[in-house]
Amino acid sequence: MKIAILDDFQDAVRHLESFKLLDGHEVKVFNNSARGLGQLAIRLEPFDALVLIRERTAFPRALLAKLPNLKLISQTGKVSGHVDVAAATEHRIAIAEGVGSPVAPSELTWALIMAASRKIVPYATNLKDGLWQTASINPALNGLGRVLNGRTLAIWGYGKIGRTVAGYGKAFGMQVLVWGSEASRQAAQADGYRAAATREEFFEQADVLSLHLRLNDATRGIVKAGDLARMKPDALFVNTSRAELVDDGALEQALKKGRPGYAALDVFTDEPLAADSEILRIPTVLATPHLGYVEQDSYEIYFRAAFENVVSFAAGKPTNILNPQALT
């Protein structure tokens, strides 16, 4: 099969142990993103199968219609709204879903919480410029960091990642407060954590608030400006899940108004994020370039599953197909 692997920004995939699974196939790895439907269609037209790295490239109906040779989309992890499944099925393009792991995104979430709380990045950056124990040359931003012990960690969403982050919070002596569906709140209480009585209480009591929700029609824009306005002026808002969970522009405006006081972000509406993005110009924001699952062990897990699905499909034994109707 002619196989394309998209958006491997770090040229990491070729060096994975699991890459050997594709031996015998014609494989092209793209290290940059094509902009625009026309460019993408020209780039991808020759290929029988595509391996997607999470949601880095979207596949709407108009693009799928321009890929007559495409028979398989093999997804690392689960499909999350970036592929028009109905259109793929109509064009007889099978979609194979993979597996994931909560470990790397959970650890990154905690790393961001620790780094933002203790102002590690600005301290380290200023040290290289000869500034000792200086978080900022702006006196208003040069305050002390703070510990997590005894403070409230508010977690919205109690799935695998939310549950893991809650465990980290407990280990650091934090009071864990959970919000989400009724099932999430009950599960959190069964694990010994406190469920917020109301959504308003959840935002008001948080010292650190972390989102761990899937993006779908029900959760898109679920965090509103009014929610953020309830947060403490020294609270930290953390999002390693999906940028679209927050109403467009609401977080930027909230940070400028000082509630919450800080944010730590790994996800953005437009990725790769432009250097002149408004969020990067806000000095109380710690931002990383969507590193949640971008880690050696996670890549091996994600790509091994995706490549195994490709090999099975090529052998005439499709596995983990989301839309089996495309095969009939």
Image (cartoon, rainbow, N blue to C red):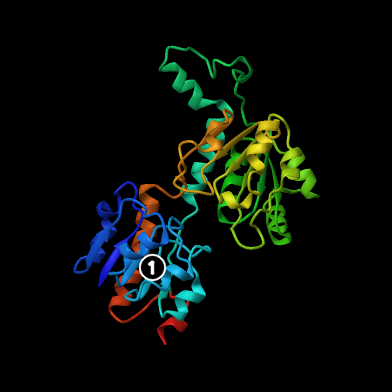
Picture quadrant where residue 44 is located: bottom left
Point 48% across, 12% down: residue: 132
Q: What x and y, as percent, mark residue 60? A: 48, 67
Question: Farthest left residue?
Answer: 24
Point 20% across, 65% down: residue: 23
Q: State the quadrant of the C terminus.
A: bottom left
Amino acid tagged 1: Ser
Q: Secondary structure at mark 1?
A: strand
Picture quadrant where residue 50 is located: bottom left
Residue situated in front as seen by the camera: 175 or 232: 232
Point 37% across, 51% down: residue: 297
Residue situated in front as seen by the camera: 226 or 39: 39
Picture quadrant where residue 174 is located: top right
Vertical relation: 1 (above or below) 78: below
Q: What x and y, as percent, mark residue 32? A: 33, 51
Few, some or many residues within 10 Å of mark 1 (<14, 14–19, 20+): many
Vertical relation: 255 (above or below) 146: below
The residue that disc 1 covers is 74
Question: Farthest bottom residue?
Answer: 328
Q: What x and y, as percent, mark residue 198? A: 80, 50
Q: Is residue 322 visible in this depiction of the protein?
A: no
Vertical relation: 47 (above or below) 227: below
Residue situated in front as seen by the camera: 209 or 52: 52
Q: What x and y, as percent, mark residue 233? A: 71, 30
Q: State the quadrant of the N terminus.
A: bottom left
